[in-house]
Image (cartoon, grey):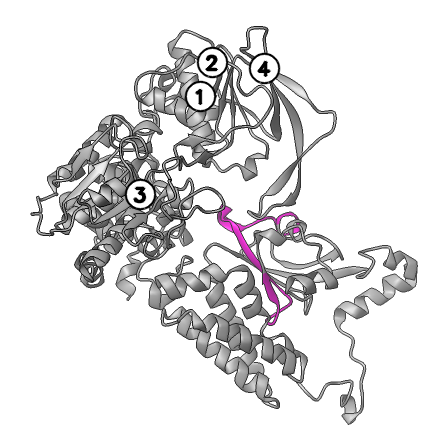
Amino acid sequence: RPPFPSVSGLWGKPTNINNVETWANVAPIVLNGAAWFAAIGTEGSKGTKVFSLAGKLNNTGLVEVPMGVTLRELIFGVGGGITRNRHFKAVQMGGPSGGCLGPEHLDLPVDYDSLKEAGAIMGSGGVIVTDETTCMVDFARFFVNFTQTESCGKCVPCRLGTKRMLEILERITRGEGEMADLDRLERLATAIKRTSLCGLGQTAPNPVLSTLKYFRHEYEEHILEKRCSACQCEALVKAPCTHTCPADVDTPSYLALVASGQFEDAVAVHMERNPFPSICGRVCNHPCEAMCKRAEIDAPVSVTAVKRFMADAVPSSAVLKPVAQTQSHRVAVVGAGPCGLSCAYQLALSGFPVTVLEALPVAGGMLQVGLPDFRMPKDVVAREVQAILGMGIELRTDQRLGRDFSLESLLEGGFDAVLVAIGAHETKALEVEGEDAEGVLPGVEFLRDVNLGDPPAIGRRVAVVGGGSVALDAARASLRLQQMAGLTRDVTLVYRRSRTEMPAFEWEVLEGDEEGLQFEYLVAPRRVVKDELGHVRGLECARMELGEADDSGRCRPISVPGSEFVLECDTIITAIGQSIDLSWMNGDGIGVSRWGGIVADPSDFHTADPRVFAGGDVVRGPATLIEAIGDGQRAAFSIERFLTGRSPRQDLLDDLQRRRLVPRASAPEETEYPRVIPARVEAEERVSSFVEVVCNITDAEARCEASRCLRCDLEH
C-alpha cells in the first residue's frame, strides 16, 4: 500500500527493492550470460519462475519452472495431480488478488501475457489448486475478505468498493442472493479495477471477475436453487451427503436407523424422496460418497452397500401405504423410466390421479432394458417399479409419443399437465465409411435386445467402440454371450482417449479386465471393413495422441499420421453416446436445445407450453440415475404448484428433514475403521452367465458400516 518504496523507502528516499527470487537469478546470469537466461522461457517472458504450489495437490511447496510451462504440466506433472483421486476444478494464480482459471485453461502457457489475457496474474507466484470440494463463490469471498482487510483506505473505490463486494458475496453464500447481485458485482468489480489508486485495489476484483466468468453457474446455483454443490456454504448445507444427492435423500438419518437395526424405518426415510432404494443400492454413482467427511479419516461410508442391504431386507412395498386420490387435476407422464416414475410417485403421494405412458412393453426405462442383469437384476427392477405403480398409478405400455398419441391429444383428452421424460434411447452414429455393414450394432439397442431376452447373434471377435458405461456394459455382455455359446471370449474395447479421460467408472474397467476384456486406448475408428457380402470383416483404426484440452477439460485426441491398422472382428458395437428421438415434435412451440434435447427451465421444468414439463435425460442429455430421480421429484413439486398454487408435498418433506433428529448410534471403537468392501463373484464363474457380480453385505457389516457415519447433520 502507498507510499511505495520507489517514492519513499529507506530513510524516506526512493529505494529499489529486489526480492529473493530476483537476487537468486543474478549469479547464474553472471556465470552463464544473458543469452543463456534469455533462451529459457518464452519470447515475452524469459527465464524461470518460482511458484508456491498449494491446495489440493499431491506435491506442494516451492518449485522453479521455465516460463511458458503449461498449467497442466505444473499441476499434474510437477504437482503430481489432485489429492484423493478427485477432479481438478480450478487454479487461483497470483496471490490473494489473482484470478481463477478452470479446466479449459489447463493447456494455457504460464507467462505474463497469457495469464493476464485469461483473467489471472503472475503476481507473487502463488498457485492454489482446488477440487470439487471447493465452492468458487466462497473462494472469491475469502480473497475479497483478505484484500478488503488489507485496503489502506486512501481511495474510495478500494476502501468501500471491496466492502460492498464482500457484503454481496456473503449474502449469496447464505442463500439470500438475487440474480441482480451478479450484475452489481460485475459493475462494482469493474469500477474498482479501473479507478483504484494502487495495485491492491486494481487487482482485488480479479477473484470475483474470473469466477463470474468461468464459474457463473455456481453463483446461479446458490441464488436460484439455494444449493452449494461443493458443500462449503454452511447456511445452505445440513449434511454434505444429503446436499450432494440430487434427490435430497436424508442419508445420515437412514444410516443411523440402519446402525440401530431399524431397517424398516430406514427404508421409509429413503422412500420419502427416492422410491428406488434397491436399485440405487446397486447402480447409483453415489455422489454422496464423494463428499463424505469420513474420507478425511480413512474412507467414505459405503452408502450404496448399506442402502442395498436395507432395501433387500425390507422391500419398498412393505413401507408404502395407499394414498387416496384427492385431487381433481389429472397428470400424464410420458416415459416410465426413473425420472417419469419418480415424478408419478410423488404426485400420487400428493393425491393426484396419474397415468404413465411407456413406449416399451415394460416399465423401468433404461433400468429395465439398458442395464444387464449382472449389474441390475430385472426382478429387483420389477419389484420396485410394481411398488410404485401400486400407489394407484395407471400404466399404459407400448404407447409411443408421436405414433400412438401426441401432447395435444393428452392435453385435449382431459390431462391438465404433462411431464415428458422419454430419456435418451438412441445410439449416436460413428459417421464412418461402411457403418451400414451387417454386423454393426448400436449399443443401446443391443443392450435392449439382450435385456428383453432376444440377444442378437454376435461373432467370434467383437469390437466395442466407446468409453462410457454403455460401452462397458455392451462389452461385458458380449463376453458372456460368447462364453455361453461355447466360443472363446474375444472382445476388444476401442477408446480414442487414454484411460485417464475415460468416462466409465474405475470398477467397471477393473471388472471387465478381470473377465478378459481387451482394451485399445488412444485408438479411433476410421472405416468399417466389409467382406464381399457386406458383412463386417474388421474395423480400420488410427492411433491417437492427446493434444490440447477441449471445453470439458479433457485432452483432444489427434490422429497420428501413418498409424492406421485393421482390428479384425466380425461384430462391431457402437457406444459413443446417446441421442433423443424428437421426431414426434410437430411445431407445438416447445424448444430444442443446441445439442438436441428439449428446452426446459432448470428450476421448475416448464417448457414453452406452461402445461408441459420436461425432465431427465431428455433435457440434460445422458446423465445419471440419481439425477433423473431428482428431476422427477422436483418436476412433481413444480407440477403441483402449477395446478394448485403451492406444493404441500415439498413443504412437508423439507419440514421433515429440517426437524428430524435421529439419535447417534454407537460408533466403532477404532478411530479408523475399514470401509466394508462387498464380495464379488469370481470372474471365471460370473462370465458363464448373467449372474449379479456384486454380492450383498451381511446384517452385521451393514450396521457397522452405517455406524461409521460422522453425523454431520447433528452439527447444525
Give the residue pinned by disc 1: 515
What kind of element bears circle 4? strand
What kind of element bears circle 3? strand
Give the residue pinned by disc 4: 538
What is the CA distance from the residue labelled 4 to the residue labelled 2?
17 Å
Q: Nearer the viewer, residue 526 or 433?
A: 433
From the image, which quarter does the N terminus lie in?
bottom right
What is the CA distance from the residue labelled 2 to the residue labelled 3?
41 Å
Point out residue 3 in the picture as x, y percentages from the top left corner.
70, 89
Give the residue pinned by disc 3: 420
Neighbourhood count class around disc 2 (C-alpha, 10 Å): few under 14, some 14–19, many 20 upward:
many
Mark linked to residue 497: none
Neighbourhood count class around disc 4 (C-alpha, 10 Å): few under 14, some 14–19, many 20 upward:
many
Neighbourhood count class around disc 1 (C-alpha, 10 Å): few under 14, some 14–19, many 20 upward:
some
Q: Are marks 4 and 1 in contact (CB under 8 Å)?
A: no
Identity of the amino acid at label 1? Glu
Camera sees residue 411: yes
Q: Are marks 1 and 2 in contact (CB under 8 Å)?
A: yes
User: 67 above or below 206?
Assistant: above
Give the residue pinned by disc 2: 489
Identity of the amino acid at label 3? Val
Identity of the amino acid at label 2? Arg
Q: Earlier in the sequence, mark 4 or mark 1?
A: 1
